[in-house]
Image: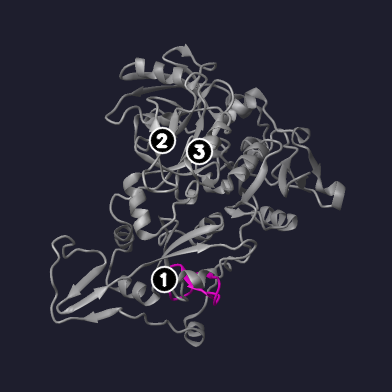
Amino acid sequence: MFGHTALLLFHPCVWDTAEQMGKTHKMRSSAGLMELTDKFTFNPKEGIDNPVMVTTEDTVWTLSPRLCVLKQEEGGSYGFNLRVESGLQGHIIRNVVSGGVAGRSGLRDGDRLLEVNNCYVDHVSHPEVARKITVSGQQLCLLVLDGEQYEQALSRGHDLRSLSIAHKGEGCKPPRLCHITRDPASGLGITFTPVKGEKGRFSVNLFPRGAAEQAGVCKGDQLVWMNGASVADLTHSTLSRMMRKCGEHITILVIDSESQKNYMRQRMPILPSMAVSHNLPNRPRKLHLVSGGDGYGFVLRLEKKRTGPTLHVLRQIESGSAAERAGMQDGEVLLEVNGEPVETLTHGEIVDRVRLSRHQVSLTTITFKGMDFYTQLGLSPLLFSEDGVVREKESSVSAAAAEQPAQKEVDGSCKPRHCTLQKGPSGFGFHLGCFPQGPGTFVSQVAFGGSGQSAGLLEGDVVMQVNGQNVEEKYLEDVIKLVEEGGKLLFLLVREVMGDNKCKQTETHVGDTEFVSQQEEDNYEISNL
């Protein structure tokens, strides 16, 4: 759960010289690394290109990646460090605590990390890998390879990504996290049937073109998780009661049946941190601020909900400032500074990181409502911050330009855009989403290389017209119907979500959520940035 990530999960990147490494650490050989055989028997099902096996004359060399499932204890850490070391490649596991969570899972000192929660990370930067682990929550799946095997694989030019794919099985698809909004006429559009003879397993039944299908649920899916609760120990009657009490929205984790069998065969849990998200509301936003040298134009302060945690909140956005140009809204909660989660940082440490960024800084933010949404699901909102990026129009603004009044830019952001799309083999190349309350639709996904991207559609664009007809007060189903009736050509009038927010003057106020300033209670510092 966001708010309970271990502070001592791992240390920052540590660079050691080869000489120091030679003195302090020796790589341990793993049993079975090299097996000498008199004869190699060809397996026609696997073939000689089996990525977990390399043959040289009479030598069979087998790579043995291991899946380690870590369950974090309340208030504790996973019990290992993740490091980058001079002279060695890959993300290295170090200082595995004997008897700790990592040790009990089978993690070993010197292991190299291949996957985090089913995501291949060997090519990913160290800070991003650390971030993936940090936001995972209480459960974590790591695919690792013994250090000596890893070095041997690199020296022989072995494809580690292929090894990773072979371990999980071809065609194994990730789960999907789907947010369903009740349709006034047809409801949620989904029911569940217990799998005969298997407790805690439920198949999905869909109403054609219903709310669930529109939210990304597919025929034949298996239910894994509902509103933050695993269904593995639930009866059908308990699940039905949960459905009746869910109100206007429900968030579920589903997976296709074949992939579920694959996960079960590997004894791998199916986690929301592995999922592809569909239609999730209240996503975090990434803001890129460029200052002209006179600050970013906002105030950072600590605020505490009367019954909740202390949060770092962005306030008093100055007109024409870098913060306003980036789309910052008063009352947003700060989640990250330059990709580093702020959950465990003090107010002063956050201020230092912003100021050390000099004239550019990237912030990840979310509304109070969004923070509550993900907290109730027991998930970190940072798991879903890839979409909805809001950037300043010109990230390379010069100091002189940044000092000019920004009123024209703000006004221009409200101007709508015409987009003409031609239907291709895979459709128009975008998905629509709906607002949690009331009518209105927006572009939730844009397919790479599709017609939507070519036409200039952006994720988060609010749809104003479809083929000349105003749809601002229409619901998702009506808008989709208009799109389909248009044939192979589609004419959209859209505006960016940043412009939409500013035109409608939507803000989150202190009084709306019963927040009190931490300074009033504990004399905390409030910083102008």
| Residue bearing the label numbered 2 | 217
- Kindly identify the residue that appears in the image at 63 percent across and 23 percent down: 503
Residue type highlighted by circle 2: Val
Q: CA distance from mark 2 to mark 3?
A: 22 Å
Q: Is residue 297 above or below residue 3?
A: above
List x then y, in percent, for residue 143: 41, 63
Element under disc 3: helix
Is residue 3 visible in the rendered image? The answer is: yes
Residue receiving disc 3: 237
Which residue occupies 27% across, 30% down? 425
Looking at the image, is mark 2 or mark 3 nearer the viewer?
Answer: 3
Task: Identify residue for label 1.
Answer: 89
Q: Is residue 298 visible?
A: no
Q: In terms of image quadrants, where is residue 67?
A: bottom left
Amino acid bearing label 1? Gln
Q: Which residues are magenta?
A: 80-100
- State which mark lies toward you, 1 or 3: 3
Q: x%, y% of residue 102?
A: 51, 69
Q: In x, y percent, where is residue 172? A: 32, 50
- Residue 47 in percent (x, y) is at 16, 63
